[in-house]
Amino acid sequence: MRRASTYIYDMPSIEEIIHQSTFESAQQKVMINLVFSGGWAKSHAARTLKAYNLTWQQFNLMRILKGQKGKAVPLRLLSSRMLDPQSNASRLVDKLVEKKWIDRVVCHVDKRQVRLSISHKGAVVLEQASLKIKAANSKLGGDLSVDELNTLSDLLDRFRNQRQHNDL
């Protein structure tokens, strides 16, 4: 059954998208919708970042480095903060170093330790890409108000928190 929609683009429901009218539970429906919506969001970001020859994982890594305010950090810090824990941070770093968007800094005390920082060239690319992402993201959310978007984010935090306490 089609739900009433006031969205400008009249996006189909998850039931219509996957051609499934019933779910085992409300939790199953939410999980399916989250997986689908996550893929949709990644595609949205990928289209926007393509013009900068950046993947959304590389963009995420560069934003983490920018947040360090010039301080060089170990790879493990980047890995722990990435949005996609399945990302191969070492491979992403190699590609960004090759583009000269991040720098490897060898520790003077222990030459085995390598730290990473965003380069000036990388910071410029990141700033340009961030402006495009910000503009693209400002169009997301249909007719949801800022309060509704904040509520959605809070509900997702609560939903995820409950999942962490249960064995999946």
Image (cartoon, rainbow, N blue to C red):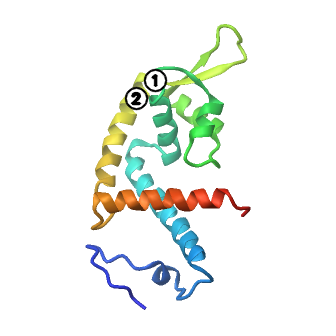
Along the horizontal axis of the image, is 119 left or right of 132?
right
Within-10-Å neighbours for mark 2: few <14, some 14–19, many 20+: some
Disc ID at residue 97: none
Answer yes or no: do the residues labelled 1 and 2 have beta carbons within 8 Å? yes
Image coordinates of residue 71 in percent, x first then y, are 51, 20
Residue at horizontal 50 percent and vertical 30 percent from the top = 65
Residue at horizontal 45 percent and vertical 53 percent from the top = 46
Q: Depth check: give the residue in front, 118 or 94.
A: 118
Element under disc 2: helix
Within-10-Å neighbours for mark 1: few <14, some 14–19, many 20+: many
Residue at horizontal 47 percent and vertical 78 percent from the top = 14
Name the kind of residue labelled 2 in the image: Ala
Residue at horizontal 46 percent and vertical 64 percent from the top = 40
Name the kind of residue labelled 1 in the image: Ser
Along the horizontal axis of the image, is 129 left or right of 119?
left
Along the horizontal axis of the image, is 140 left or right of 35?
left
Is residue 152 something that shows in the picture?
A: yes
Q: Quadrant of residue 67?
A: top left
Q: Farthest top residue?
A: 109
Disc ID at residue 119: 1
Image coordinates of residue 100 in percent, x first then y, are 49, 27
Image coordinates of residue 141 in percent, x first then y, are 33, 63
Q: Depth check: give the residue in front, 18 or 158.
A: 158
Badge 2 is on which residue? 123
Element under disc 1: loop
Q: Depth check: give the residue in front, 130 or 97.
A: 130
Is residue 140 something that shows in the picture?
A: no
Q: Farthest bottom residue?
A: 1
Q: Is residue 160 above or below residue 108?
A: below
Q: Is residue 140 above or below residue 20?
A: above
Q: Which image quarter is the N terminus in?
A: bottom left
